[in-house]
Image (cartoon, grey):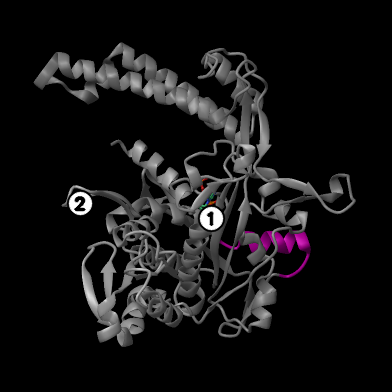
Amino acid sequence: MTQEEVFKNLIAHAKEYGFIFPSSEIYDGLSAVYDYGQMGVEMKNNIKKYWWEAMVRLNDNIVGIDSSIFMHPRIWEASGHVGAFNDPLIDNKDSKKRYRADVLIEDYLAKLEEKMNKEVEKGKKKFGEAFNEEQFRATNPNVLRSKAKWDEVHGRMTEALNKNDLVELRQIIIDCEIACPISGTKNWTDVRQFNLMFSTQLGNISDEAGTIYLRPETAQGIFVNFLNVQKTGRMKIPFGIAQIGKAFRNEIVARQFIFRMREFEQMEMQFFVRPGDEMQWFAKWKQARLAWHKALGLGEEKYRFHDHEKLAHYANAATDIEFEFPFGFKELEGIHSRTNFDLSQHQKFSGRKMQYFDPETNESYVPYVIETSIGLDRTFLAILSTAYTEEKLEDGEERVVLKIPAAIAPVKMAVLPLIKKDGLPEKAHEIMNMLKIDFNCQYDEKDSIGKRYRRQDAIGTPFCITIDHDTLVDNCVTVRDRDTMKQERVPVGSLWTIMDKKVNVRELLKGLHEDTEI
Ligand code: ATP
């Protein structure tokens, strides 16, 4: 089965077992918007808990907030989102399809590269051992022609993007004779700037003054509350403010399931430091965040850093933690050294001082910031796609099992009386009542025990606890492990302690605490 087919199966599985539903499905859905079902919401909450506790609980100098989605519109002018959070878009008049102009040109450049590589391959075949690629690329007329074209178009595109020259972007598309992949025609509209922020109107103010935005990131809610938190919490630099919340972006190319959505959730933390100390903190946070990911146990080889060579104008260092999704390595979290850009901008736009008085140096300054910004939904997808396993068992049977880390799994244990009579359900309820205060448990007495195990495998329940006739005599139960399918007899008296050690997020955090204390 190809990766693509497995990914399709995963999406179908996520729906069938109550993890993720397409939004508004009975109205044929809403593009790039999803709902989390009864299993999904539990798992999402567990991820949030793991992040929140690792940030806020384990670090004495980090506190959390929950700011609102609507904010004063001037905030988005100060942050640069009104002016610069734009994509240049163009429509094909025949197919009515909308594209990012720069992506169309980049696809054209990729085709030129492909053409050059093909020439090189041909040369390799022709000259065999004696082939010198460098010399071939420097002299072959076909390669040189394509290279000259590539350089010209790339140069024009970069300049047009830098100058925000939309007319020139369109002219490049015309000059290169780029056709719409759907209609095959070159019947293009003008290029327009398209802001990725959703806007709406405040109350009954219908003109521009009433325009407000759905936040495209949670970070600005932290920046504008910097002084409130610092003063009321008596925070001393270095310190951090963490927040989990919804963000909205009118993404043009929204695809790959919950990887790129129009409404999503972020877990962000801004760490305020003394100017000049930022590189040291940037390095620390890179390591701390990678350790957080690795502790989940999805496989160390699935993560890599991608350092940014081209930095945003306000950043002096930036890296992405990329994860190997079913469609390749893609950004999961961004770690940015944002200098004092945001606080200085808010100082300028609001007229309020955003300064900190440092009692150690007797100086006032606008702090520098290291940001860690991770997508909750992308983390969900990273875990779910790694956990999804189609297995052929020794007895020839097949099972689909979600090998979700126990601390993140939506249901921790299933409590299963072997049969529906002889006092077994009563005993099972007794055990269920003991466990359910601390753990999300499911009680199930329907169908054969084998079928019930499969149902729990399919939602990733790490442990099944079976109550049989012997239980009534020896007060022991059978605990079945989801991954190994091994069974073990355990006294009811020790059940809580054994389970707690295996499924509590505390165990993940303990390991983390030793490795990454900030
Ligand atoms: P990308 O390059 O993939 O569009 P980005 O660089 O714009 O992402 P940031 O602005 O750094 O992303 O946002 C921080 C994090 O928020 C990302 O690492 C990602 O996990 C998450 N994120 C951003 N956009 C989306 C989206 N449309 N859907 C889901 N998660 C998102």
**Side of 237 where 449 appears, left or right:** left
Between 429 and 510, the one lying in front of the other is 429
Where is 488 relative to 299, above or below? Answer: below
Between 70 and 25, the one lying in front of the other is 25
Q: Which residue is mark 1?
A: 37
Q: Which mark is residue 229?
A: none
> Which marked residue is nearer to the observer: mark 1 or mark 2?
2
Q: Which residues are magenta?
A: 338-353
Q: Residue at x 63, y 84 (%)?
A: 234
Mainly helix, strand or loop, the magenta region? Answer: helix
Where is 251 relative to 107, above or below? Answer: below
Q: Residue at x 29, y 51 (%)?
A: 399
Q: Residue furthest left?
A: 129
Relative image position of residue 72 (x, y in whole percent): 77, 58
Relative image position of residue 339 (x, y in whole percent): 56, 61
Q: Is residue 138 visible?
A: no
Say what amino acid the circle numbered 1 marks.
Gly
Between 65 and 346, the one lying in front of the other is 65
> Is the distance from the Cβ of mark 2 to the nearest ligand 1 atom less than 8 Å?
no
Q: Which residue is mark 2?
A: 393
First along the sequence among labels 1 and 2: 1
